[in-house]
Amino acid sequence: MSKEENLECSFCGRKKVETDLLIAGIDAHICDKCIEQAHGIVLEEILEKEDVANPADLEVKKPLEIKSFLEEYIIGQDQTKKTMASSCLQSLQKIDTTKISSRGSRD
């Protein structure tokens, strides 16, 4: 029995002859079926995260409101707080603009 005949998927245990594809890693192997299953899991996770992190659900605050919030956590450094507040607003506006342009209209 050759060494190649002994190869099996490290995830499900399928032998190489039982798979269409067996990919070798450093210390493990993965078959095409496990890759398909993992791909499905990754897609589900991405969709769940997109639902949770939907920028449309964010309430966009004015820079002054953001600065006031930062006042509670940062002592002094007024110019830094102003810069951070403006940067936050600009970032949120870019996200919103990207979302509008990718979908054609705002949700």
Image (cartoon, rainbow, N blue to C red):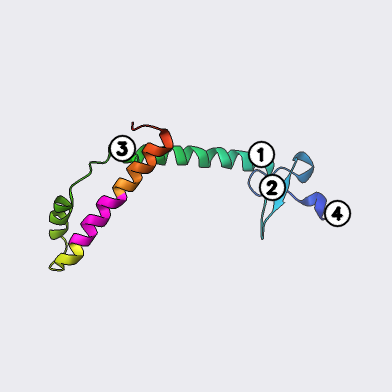
* Numbered label attached to residue 33: 1
Asked if residue 71 is among those painted magenta in the image, a careful observer would answer no
Q: Amino acid at mark 2?
A: Cys
For mark 3, give the secondary structure.
helix
Sequence-first tag of 1 and 4 = 4
Rendered residue at 14%/53% (across/down): 64
Distance from disc 1 to disc 4, alpha carbons, whole Å, reads 24 Å
Sequence-first tag of 2 and 4 = 4
Density class for disc 3 (Cα within 10 Å; few <14, some 14-19, many ≥20) is few
Rendered residue at 76%/51% (across/down): 7
* Front tag of 4 and 3: 3
Density class for disc 4 (Cα within 10 Å; few <14, some 14-19, many ≥20) is few
Kindly check if marks 1 and 2 are in contact, taking CB atoms under 8 A apart as contact: yes
Q: Which segment is the magenta one?
A: 82-91
Kindly identify which residue carries mark 2.
9
Q: Quadrant of residue 56?
A: top left
Sequence-first tag of 2 and 3 = 2
Kindly identify which residue carries mark 3.
56
Q: Amino acid at mark 3?
A: Ala
Sequence-first tag of 1 and 2 = 2
Relative to residue 9, is residue 3 drawn left or right? right
Along the line of sight, the residue nearer the viewer: 95 or 44: 95
Sequence-first tag of 1 and 3 = 1
Pinpoint residue 63: horizontal percent, then vertical percent.
Answer: 18, 52
Rendered residue at 19%/46% (across/down): 61
Pinpoint residue 79: horizontal percent, then vertical percent.
Answer: 17, 66
Distance from disc 4 to disc 3, alpha carbons, whole Å, reads 58 Å
Kindly identify which residue carries mark 4.
2
For mark 2, give the secondary structure.
loop
* Front tag of 1 and 3: 3
